[in-house]
């Protein structure tokens, strides 16, 4: 196998990268100055050597425990469950949640053979059983797999002595009702709340 063909195949191993995109990336990379390619390889190696899942929540971080779990000002009685570190970072950037997180490391996907027990679930159940947790917030993506994961997780936690909630969904600020699809409008109607008067 040629070196270029192997590079293209390595790019194809990345999520969301098909044959044409992999080929485009490979040709782009080999046309760049060698120093740029070496810097990319160094960044990848450094990330693999440095980043690891937090032993408390599963968030990918440089330190263990991660900075969120190590923060003594966080509300440890409220745990927000997310699919991955990407969702954790997005929620954390808003600055509205002051509890702690739990990263499942994926979502239920029957087509890929991923069941709820294949996810990082055991540490969450242990935390709920051994600590004073009053609320678990399910913050799954509103996809078919995300909804299935949230539903199964809610069932799993039904007998636990915690309040299980889900993040609200619906019409985003600044949007018009007539431009929303039926799923978004349905979520907005089901998730309605008291009006501030």
Image (cartoon, rainbow, N blue to C red):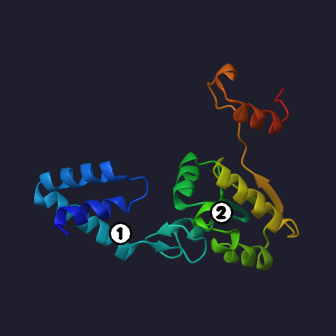
Whole-angstrom CA distance, mark 2 to mark 1, is 30 Å
Q: Nearer the viewer, mark 2 or mark 1?
A: 2
Is residue 5 at all visible to an observer of this figure? yes
How many neighbours does mark 1 have within 10 angstroms: few (below 14), some (14-19), or many (20 or more)?
Answer: few
Indicate the secondary structure of the residue bearing disc 1.
helix
Q: Where, by quadrant of the figure, is residue 81 drawn?
A: bottom right
Quadrant of the rendering where the N terminus is positioned: bottom left
At a point 73% along the width and 79% down the height, the residue shown is 126
Q: In this image, 142 relative to 23: left or right?
A: right
At a point 63% along the width and 50% down the height, the residue shown is 141
The residue singled out by tag 2 in the image is 110
- Judging depth in this view, the residue of 146 and 169 nearest the camera is 146
Is residue 107 at all visible to an observer of this figure? no
Coordinates of residue 156 in the picture (x, y in percent): 80, 68
At a point 68% along the width and 31% down the height, the residue shown is 171
Q: Residue furthest front?
A: 1
Coordinates of residue 63 in the picture (x, y in percent): 46, 73
Coordinates of residue 71 in the picture (x, y in percent): 58, 67
- Judging depth in this view, the residue of 136 and 108 nearest the camera is 108
Coordinates of residue 106 in the picture (x, y in percent): 59, 63
How many neighbours does mark 2 have within 10 angstroms: few (below 14), some (14-19), or many (20 or more)?
Answer: few
The residue singled out by tag 1 in the image is 47
């Amino acid at each position: 196998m040629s070196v270029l063909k192997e590079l293209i195949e390595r790019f194809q191993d990345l999520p969301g990268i098909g044959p044409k995109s992999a080929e485009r990336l490979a040709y782009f990379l080999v046309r760049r100055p060698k120093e740029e390619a070496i810097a990319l390889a160094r960044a990848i190696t450094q990330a693999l050597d440095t980043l690891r899942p937090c032993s408390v929540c599963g968030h990918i971080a440089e330190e263990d425990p991660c900075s969120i779990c190590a923060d003594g000002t966080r509300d440890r009685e409220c745990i927000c469950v997310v699919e991955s570190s990407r969702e954790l970072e997005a929620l954390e950037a808003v600055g509205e949640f002051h509890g702690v997180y739990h990263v499942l490391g994926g979502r239920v996907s029957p087509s890929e053979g991923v069941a709820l027990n294949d996810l990082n679930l055991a540490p969450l159940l242990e935390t709920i059983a051994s600590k004073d947790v009053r609320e678990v917030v399910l913050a799954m993506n509103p996809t078919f797999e995300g909804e299935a994961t949230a539903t199964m997780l809610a069932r799993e936690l039904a007998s636990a002595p915690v309040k299980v909630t889900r993040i609200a969904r619906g019409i985003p600020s600044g949007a018009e009702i007539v431009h929303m699809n039926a799923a978004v409008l349905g979520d907005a109607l089901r998730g309605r709340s008291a009006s501030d008067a």
